[in-house]
Image (cartoon, rainbow, N blue to C red):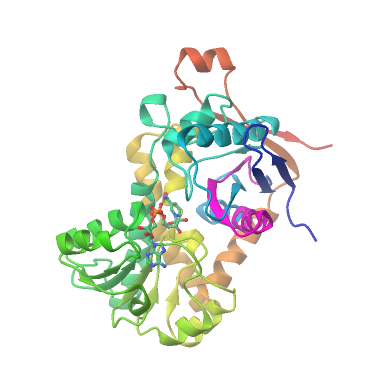
Amino acid sequence: MLDHEQVAIHAGRRSRLPVIVAVHSTALGPAAGGLRLWHYPDWRDGLTDALRLSAAMTSKFAVAGLPIGGGKAVVALPEGMELDADRRRDVLRDVADVIASLSGVYATGPDVGTSPADMAVIGETTPHVFCKPTDLGGSGDSSPHTAQGALAALRAVSRRLHGTSSLGGRSLAVIGLGRVGVGLARLLAAEGAVLTVTDIDLDKQKISDELGAVWRSPDEILAADVDIVVPAALGSVLTSRTAADLRCRAVVGPANNQLATPDVADLLYQRDIIWVPDYVASAGGVINAISAELHRVSADEARARVRAIEDTVDDLLDTAQRCGQTPAQAASELARRRLSATSPAKHRFTWPDASLLARTGGRQRVRATRRSTP
Ligand SMILES: NC(=O)c1ccc[n+]([C@@H]2O[C@H](COP(=O)([O-])OP(=O)(O)OC[C@H]3O[C@@H](n4cnc5c(N)ncnc54)[C@H](O)[C@@H]3O)[C@@H](O)[C@H]2O)c1
């Protein structure tokens, strides 16, 4: 059964590549979620990714307490295809056409394989886009905020493990030194954490040296003898096999899709390893973008909302302990409760008209409107 409100699949007019936009739910508000431009063995694998990721966005916004629904866009590149600048622009304009055709039900943002500069290209066609560069009126790169949000989740877990939210002197293994991972590793190092790090890109060893971290290979790091493992790369890093190898007391990080299968959360629970659902720990970027661009709160208020992930994780861990549940069950029940408390409505992002958009260079106020369904 299709669990989604709508799924648009188009062959791009210019690129002929499959452009997929999955809108999982607009029960809480119009749907948002990033654009993934990634290689897949078959475009249908991209569809599977879009369906899964958009459902996770619904949970991400619900648990974060934001009135936004879950969506995701995927362009499925054939294996080995590289895009030159012109072809990339064609792809982005194709994506923009599909988003524009949805009339505000869905707005996109950056994700794996896309950046604020790509959002600027999409913004030439449709206003339904977050995280354009700041000089074009967007909130820019979300990764520093995602790193701050992951740090907030780590503080809540540290309090549970050690009685204090300080990460000074704690040992952490960070997997992946990309945009989010390196920012998070720097924040942790600045606080005096003892770091072990890895990346498949061996050039990142320079960053490891700079941080005074111990470098391990990606194969070894999961079994590192540390307090907390921090997934900040790609892929389903937690399988039944890797869960059995872990020697840490918790796994908390910003990477999406950490579990190969949902039952791995139960295996971790049985081993007394705290796992904070990835969609909770990785919410800092979207919380900041929605707060800054949609709600137009001050930068301080947006930062406070990101830091509130610490309270969210505290509450989830309390609930899980009280009810004898995994944190994953506690989070999914919270999301379900918030979703079922809404009345049926159609939500859309509304933005000023295109001429105002051009005059203000995109510095316009975004609103989410709600119309009751008959
Ligand atoms: N950027 C954001 O704001 C944001 C928001 C929410 C979630 N996330 C998630 O956080 C994760 C990292 O995002 P990012 O923006 O930093 O991506 P990125 O592409 O900048 O970085 C990913 C890093 O992981 C490394 N890597 C890939 N596979 C690896 C492996 N098997 N072992 C070790 N390292 C590996 C890559 O070489 C790269 O350095 C992703 O799962 C992403 O979906 C990011």
The residue at the point 20 percent across, 68 percent down is 193
> Furthest-right residue in view?
374
Whole-percent x, y for residue 355 in the image: 56, 12
Classify 355 as above or below 215: above
Q: Which of the pair 315/362 is nearer the observer?
A: 362
Q: What is the magenta range? A: 28-56
Q: Where is residue 370 in the image (x, y as percent from the top left)?
A: 68, 34
Q: Residue at x 50, y 31 (%)?
A: 86
Residue 174 is situated, as x and y percent measured from the top left of the image, at: 32, 67
Residue 324 seen in this snapshot:
no
In percent of width and height, residue 34 lies at 53, 45
Count of numbered badges drawn on the protein: 0
The foreground one among 350 and 89 is 89
Q: Does the magenta stretch include residue 126?
A: no
The C terminus appears in which quarter of the rendering?
top right
Is residue 46 covered in magenta?
A: yes
Q: Residue 139: in sight, yes or no?
A: yes
124 relative to 348 in the view: left or right: left
Classify residue 167 as left or right of residue 325.
Answer: left
Quadrant location of the N terminus in the rendered image: bottom right
| Image height of 313 relative to 162, above or below | above
Residue 48, image quadrant? bottom right
Residue 235 sits above or below residue 149 on the image? below
306 or 222: which is nearer to us? 222
Q: In this view, does 216 lie above or below 232?
A: below
Q: Name the quarter showing ligand 1.
A: bottom left
Q: In which quarter of the image is residue 189?
A: bottom left
